[in-house]
Image (tube, rainbow, N blue to C red):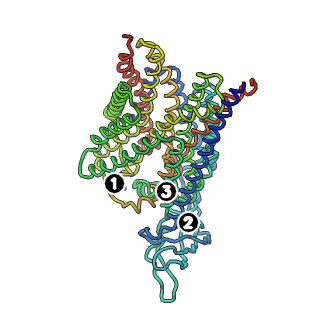
């Protein structure tokens, strides 16, 4: 019931204060939720979690580019840069997950145990699931910033139609720094809110040496750092792609 | 024509210098990362427990176990791992040890070791016949965390430059502030009464770092405070108007036993913190856009409102997925665990991952509520000073 009330408040606010984009955002979020549910069902039915997750990210990205941003050029470029970056960071994600041994649940999660009805004999690839969690969080954080950077690029090009590729690229990088700063802030606070209770446990029960080696801290810190690294890297990647796309026709006119 | 060629060559020169500088910075970062990795992988001189590296893993199957979730049977395979461990610290440094370890293949609650993992060892003893025994501890992960930290901060500095320094500083201060707040919480102080002012203070501090213009600063601060308070009010409203009581058992990582009133304050604090990031992002973007519009001559409130709304449209559209995916990503393993233990999807959504869903919804409410707060604040504080004299 509480979730329903919050959902109604959200939809009311969007209808009141946002225009078409807001209504499209509602549909996109519903679609995203359905895609996640569908991929969960696929994993439940036995599909490899990593494949299901990558397909889900692709589906949500394509839908956002086509529907939310109505196929605008900048949206397709943003999607391309997000895909490129995920491919780039995937080896790092797999390295951390394999070295970190943090798949599954930690002793800090008091409620999740065999005796509470969450039995362990489920024959699931938790390793791939761990990697999937990071990929989904990464996709979420990257799309907003990629769109922002592409928009910056487009604005700069609109202000000076004869701008060269290199100047557009460096200017986009410079202006995009502000977007990077606010994006880092946003995801930092979201993750801090999510793990507040875990920090309470750490401060009250454990010492620093235990915490830095613990499963729970590593899995959480891995997700946060992957998202932060992704955000830092999507600035040049997205700036490069959008600058190239906006100026590639110019060389023909010289 | 010649002048243009020179100008182009000049620009290419600048790009060349920048590219070289970037490559140099990246090389420096990778060197630093590699150094940190090596140091922490071999930190026997300051680790407070003995550890070793697994040099060989021999696996043999154990009897499997099965479970039934109401519609499917699952067969969980168990394996026995014979681990050969090279001791890297303590009295028996340099010697080899053999230990047995039992693990499942899913690893829901246990760990499967691989060659190259570092593990902690407790109570290393030498038997009368010279064989070493020990208790197998958990995986050693400090080098991974520190490596990721260096990589993260380094890349951020490289691409965010000077502004990045202020962000890192503010985030570091945030964490320090949180630590102090938690210490006060353990002495009995109300966590929500501390969280809200602290979040707002740090938001204001960050704005002070970023913004020089007094009017823009005030507009940002007022909008941020209004939106945060509004979001908290709406969250409280949704909880009080619902007939059912929240079951805080599934608030992940909550210390048991707990007092429900205390748990509620913690939950509300989580909502406030999670929403504030998105609120700040939206407020700063819209106030900045409004300022640009006013500079370009848009002066009456109505058209300013409409133009800002268009900016907000795209912004909300790209921010909602961020709030959605980052909040629910971590709950997916638990979701699947529940599904394979026979829970229905609707039960999972309403009980087991209730808090993640709520954090997403309240975060989104904050994002959207920041829009009118920012626009009204911008109109009130910015358009006044731009009035033609």
Closer mark to the observer between disc 3 and disc 1: 3
Q: Residue at x 59, y 42 (%)?
A: A39
**Is residue B180 found left or right of A164 in the rendered image?**
left
The answer to whether residue A52 is above or below residue B125 is above
Query: Residue B256 got which mark?
Result: 1
The N terminus of chain B, quarter of image: top right
Q: Secondary structure at mark 3?
A: helix
Q: Is residue B88 visible?
A: yes
Closer mark to the observer between disc 3 and disc 2: 3
Q: Earlier in the sequence, mark 2 or mark 1?
A: 2
Residue B382 in percent (x, y) is at: 38, 20
Quarter where residue B271 is shown: top left
Residue A188 in percent (x, y) is at: 44, 43
Instruction: Say which residue label 3 marks.
Output: B145
The answer to whether residue A221 is above or below residue A59 is below
Label 3, residues with CA under 10 Å away: few <14, some 14-19, many ≥20 = many
Residue B174 in percent (x, y) is at: 37, 45
Q: Earlier in the sequence, mark 3 or mark 2?
A: 2
Instruction: Say which residue label 2 marks.
Output: B117
Residue B340 in percent (x, y) is at: 53, 51
């Amino acid at each position: 019931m509480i979730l329903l009330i919050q959902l109604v408040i959200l939809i009311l606010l969007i209808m009141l204060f946002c225009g078409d984009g807001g209504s499209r955002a509602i549909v996109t979020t519903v679609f995203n939720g359905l895609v996640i549910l569908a991929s969960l069902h696929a994993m439940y039915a036995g599909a490899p979690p990593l494949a299901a997750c990558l397909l889900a990210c692709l589906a949500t990205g394509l839908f956002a580019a086509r529907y939310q941003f109505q196929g605008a050029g900048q949206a397709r470029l943003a999607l391309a840069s997000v895909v490129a970056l995920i491919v780039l960071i995937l080896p790092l994600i797999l390295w951390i997950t394999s070295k970190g041994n943090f798949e599954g649940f930690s002793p800090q999660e008091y409620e999740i145990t065999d005796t509470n009805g969450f039995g362990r004999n489920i024959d699931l690839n938790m390793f791939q699931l761990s990697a999937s969690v990071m990929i989904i969080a990464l996709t979420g954080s990257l799309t907003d910033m990629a769109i922002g950077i592409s928009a910056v690029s487009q604005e700069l090009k609109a202000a000076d139609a004869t701008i060269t590729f290199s100047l557009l690229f460096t200017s986009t990088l410079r202006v995009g720094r502000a977007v990077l700063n606010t994006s880092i802030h946003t995801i930092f606070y979201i993750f801090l809110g999510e793990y507040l209770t875990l920090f309470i446990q750490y401060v009250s029960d454990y010492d620093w040496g235990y915490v830095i080696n613990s499963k729970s801290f590593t899995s959480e810190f891995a997700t946060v750092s992957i998202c932060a690294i992704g955000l830092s890297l999507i600035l040049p990647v997205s700036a490069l792609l959008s600058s190239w796309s906006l100026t590639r026709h110019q060389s023909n006119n010289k | 024509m010649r002048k243009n060629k020179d100008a182009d060559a000049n620009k290419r020169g600048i790009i060349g210098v920048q590219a070289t500088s970037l490559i140099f910075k990246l090389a420096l970062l990778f060197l630093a990362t590699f150094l940190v990795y090596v140091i922490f992988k071999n930190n026997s001189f300051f680790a407070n427990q003995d550890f070793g590296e697994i040099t060989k893993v021999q696996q043999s199957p154990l009897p499997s176990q099965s479970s039934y979730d109401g519609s499917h049977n699952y067969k969980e395979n168990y394996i026995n791992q014979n681990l050969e461990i090279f001791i890297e610290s303590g009295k028996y440094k340099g010697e080899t040890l053999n230990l047995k370890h039992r693990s499942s293949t899913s690893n829901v609650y246990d760990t499967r070791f691989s060659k190259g993992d570092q593990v902690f060892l407790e109570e290393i003893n030498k038997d009368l016949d010279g064989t070493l025994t020990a208790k197998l501890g958990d995986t050693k992960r400090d080098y991974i965390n520190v490596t990721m930290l260096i990589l993260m901060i380094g890349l951020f500095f490289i691409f965010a430059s000077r502004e990045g320094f202020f962000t890192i500083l503010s985030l570091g201060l945030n964490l320090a502030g949180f630590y102090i707040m938690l210490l006060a919480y353990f002495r009995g102080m109300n966590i929500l009464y501390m969280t809200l002012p602290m979040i707002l203070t740090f938001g204001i501090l960050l704005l002070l770092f970023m913004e020089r213009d007094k009017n823009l600063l005030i507009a940002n601060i007022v909008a941020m405070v209004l939106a945060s308070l509004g979001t908290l009010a709406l969250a409280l409203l949704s909880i009080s108007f619902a007939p059912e009581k929240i079951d805080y058992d599934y608030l992940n990582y909550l210390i048991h036993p707990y007092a429900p009133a205390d748990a509620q304050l913690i939950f509300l604090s989580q909502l406030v913190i999670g929403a504030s990031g998105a609120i700040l992002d939206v407020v700063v973007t819209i106030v900045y856009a409004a300022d640009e519009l006013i500079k370009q001559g848009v002066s009456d409130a109505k058209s300013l409102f409409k133009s800002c709304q268009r900016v907000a449209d795209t912004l909300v559209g790209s921010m909602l997925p961020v709030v959605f995916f980052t909040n629910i990503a971590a709950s997916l393993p638990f979701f699947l665990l529940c599904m394979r233990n026979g829970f229905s999807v609707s039960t999972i959504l309403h009980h087991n991952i209730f808090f993640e869903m709520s954090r997403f919804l309240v975060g989104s409410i904050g994002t959207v509520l920041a829009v009118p707060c920012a626009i009204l604040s911008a109109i009130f504080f910015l358009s006044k000073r731009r009035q033609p004299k």
